Amino acid sequence: MSDTALRICPLCEATCGLTLTIEDGRVTGARGDREDVFSAGFICPKGAAFGELDGDTDRLTGPLVRDKDGELHEATWAEAFAAVEAGLREVLDAHGTEALGVMLGNPNVHTIAGALYPPVIMQALGGRNLYTASTVDQMPKQVACGYLYGNPLAFPVPDLDRTDHLLVIGANPVVSNGSLATAADFPGKLKALRRRGGRLIVVDPKRTRTARLADRHIAPRPGTDAALLFAMVQVLFEEGLVALGELSERITGLDELRALAADFTPEAVAAYCDVPAAEIRGLARELADADRAAVYGRMGSTTTEYGTVASWLVDVLNVLTGNLDRPGGVLFPQSATGRAPRPPKPGKGFKVGRWHSRVSGHPEVMNEFPLAALAEEIDTPGEGRLRALLTIAGNPVLSAPDGDRLDRALGSLDFMVSVDPYLNETTRHAHVVLPPPRPSQSPHYDVAFSRISVRDNARYSPAAVPLEPGRPDESEILARIAMVLGGLPVDGDPGGVDDLVIGHGLRQAVGDPHSPVHGQDPDALAGRLTGATGYERQLDLRLRLGPYGEGFGADPEGLTLDRLKASPHGIDLGPLKPRLGEILRTPSGKVELCPAPVAADVPRLRAALAVRANGGLVLIGRRHLRSNNSWMHNVPALTGGSNRCTLQVHPEDATRLGLADGGTAAVKGDGGEVAAEVEVTDEMRPGVVSLPHGWGHDRPGTRMRVAARAPGVNVNQLLDGSRLDPLSGTSVLNGFPVQVSPA
Ligand SMILES: Nc1nc2c(c(=O)[nH]1)N[C@H]1C(S)=C(S)[C@@H](COP(=O)(O)OP(=O)(O)OC[C@H]3O[C@@H](n4cnc5c(=O)[nH]c(N)nc54)[C@H](O)[C@@H]3O)O[C@H]1N2
Ligand SMILES: Nc1nc2c(c(=O)[nH]1)N[C@H]1C(S)=C(S)[C@@H](COP(=O)(O)OP(=O)(O)OC[C@H]3O[C@@H](n4cnc5c(=O)[nH]c(N)nc54)[C@H](O)[C@@H]3O)O[C@H]1N2
Ligand code: SF4
Ligand SMILES: [Mo]
């Protein structure tokens, strides 16, 4: 018996709609859903392998619990939850809240459960030891947006369908399919931009697949983008090209910015960036000249030595050219599950450092400490040491600096719980592993990515394959953990967690004079929510009270979960619209163009300009279309073919270093040494080598048999965790020094 079901792909940020073929409860095929309102049939090899990934026989089907001899064995769900309760309670009772750390990994932004329950878990715990993948990723952008707009989650995204000029800084969307700019078929949109006469310019030390599509490719020395972007700002001021348009009344700090940029002339930065001054000047003039332009930066701009400064300057350029909050420029999406628009008002502004980490004194940023500091918080003795850890959808042994140290630290914990479908490099240390069901058995709504989509839309896929009786979904798993941390018995009704969240949300809404339900009875409103499960009722609440919602009767045509379910290919909510006024929550109520904490980091950059490059090699990362971070190397459909974990080296460097294509190189960094196969390619810029992350599947005690056969090496072993962007606590993963020699 074969059947089809629609499912939004959770495997990257593009959120493509898939049509799954299902036979006897197994996914036997996946193709693009041509009727999907957002992706219109686009699919990539990962989406096409959804069935293989979903049906991977190494996926855990039930929980694992560590016995007294230290061995993991299969257990019932009731036993596993009881073990979680006992283990966490013991640590918390003996050592207090601060003894438990929480690590949230990337797939949390790809699940409903990951969107709805981790905040409840953190609140129930009341602790200050949160670590996430953000500090090996986009945190610099969040900090920059926090200061500029007063809201660290307000990301302006490039209006890909309408722009005339796209300047890409350190992103490779033809391979990554886009990030912090959710667009299905990003490659197609870049081609369409060029077809309609627009320009694509890529700044990347490597001639990537995206760079090959571009009108122009500029290859700076890694880590120098902040200086290059500053020089563009300087040119805009110097040549009278600043054109704020309607933004002129809505910004502060223009004079301070001009003064700060004054000495970053193209000539002053050219040698540091290794880009001719005339080219930098040209970049600025072309940007100013374009009718509608967007500057867009990603990993190559954020995970660098000056990540926050570079991320800030990306937005500064959009402001100075009048392209912020304008069609064809960069705009703030309006998510259907976000808050309904509020009248503009000044906010409290963005602050970091409300508390500091125990060992290195890192400031908290958005309640988080740097992921790079997790190991030291566990293995450094003393009062307040982390003794227990909860990981949800994370594999920091491979994704964070110095995996060997973290690996040892995790092995020393009194108690560790992992919510993860695999027994991998990280979860192998857990005392209890709680696997979520397969993606085909999980519902989907992109709470996170609808905040950053290049076109507003709402799409919901219910689970395509029913859960086995007694099997908890990921929402229930996380709700039960929240119950333990909140002091409730773990075997109680997990729906109570949803009721609490819903009750809290409704009480806030009825007390809010701008809400359509102001003054109404929250219990009566709760009774009107539909949805078969707690998370569905939460979703219904968010949709109803959101910007497109029916507001419990206020707009009878508006969105509800039922309406969304009646549109299985999704609901298109139109192109992005200007809405800066609703976004701004800075103390001044304006875009604060020259925030003091960012300006305070500029002398560090200025000092770097004076230091001549020593000619040493630096390393950058890369991604592969058939992979995602560390967890897709166990699927034969996505891993066959030649070795992908190679050290890419420019021919000149290869000759100078005595490296042969196909030979082995020893690569050494602050944190250790790895040996990798050499791939000589002139796509690299001289002086720069590249190694992908997410590899190194050769540790014992994992259960990923395919991955273990071609383990690759862990690039993050080359780091010791000390190189951070100081404003965001984000690791420098791109542009760090290495030594390379034949092995
Ligand atoms: N050197 C270097 N390091 C990097 C990067 C780089 O470019 N270079 N990139 C960084 C970036 S951008 C990121 S986002 C991080 C990622 O860092 P992590 O989030 O730590 O790593 P992932 O490999 O994404 O691990 C995801 C984990 O979630 C599990 N998982 C998959 N699906 C689900 C699910 O539905 N539910 C649950 N509970 N678990 C699930 C997987 O089995 C895996 O254990 O890595 C960072 N590390
Ligand atoms: N196929 C695939 N897709 C993915 C992922 C994956 O692993 N595989 N991971 C997902 C995740 S978690 C994320 S965060 C996104 C990331 O999405 P992207 O940021 O688009 O992906 P990267 O490949 O990290 O691209 C970073 C680019 O920056 C360049 N770069 C490195 N250093 C510098 C520098 O100093 N300056 C400049 N200008 N450029 C530099 C690199 O050469 C690279 O081309 O991708 C997502 N999508
Ligand atoms: S591009 Fe991303 S969302 Fe689309 S099919 Fe591929 S992995 Fe899935
Ligand atoms: Mo990421």
Image (spheres, rainbow, N blue to C red):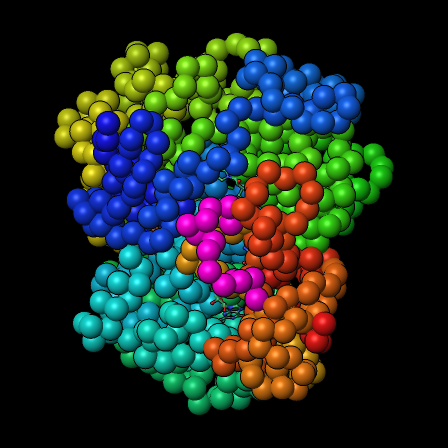
Residue 239 picture quarter: bottom left
**Residue placed most toward the observer, 702 or 554:** 702
State the residue at coordinates (43%, 52%): 638
Position of residue 39 measured from the top left corner of the image (x, y, whole percent):
25, 49
- The magenta segment: 633-646
Left or right placement of residue 591 versus residue 419 in this view: left
State the residue at coordinates (61%, 14%): 79
Position of residue 120 measured from the top left corner of the image (x, y, whole percent):
52, 27
Position of residue 489 measured from the top left corner of the image (x, y, whole percent):
59, 11
- Magenta region's main secondary structure? loop
In the rendered view, would you say 104 is above or below 264?
Answer: above
- Looking at the rendered image, the quarter that the C terminus falls into is bottom right
In the rendered view, would you say 400 is above or below 705?
Answer: below
- Looking at the rendered image, the quarter that the N terminus falls into is top left
Residue 342 picture quarter: top left
Q: Is residue 261 visible?
A: no
In the rendered view, would you say 353 is above or below 682?
Answer: above
Q: Residue furthest right?
A: 382
Q: Is residue 380 visible?
A: yes
**Residue placed most toward the observer, 411 or 362:** 411
Q: Check if residue 637 falls in the magenta segment.
A: yes
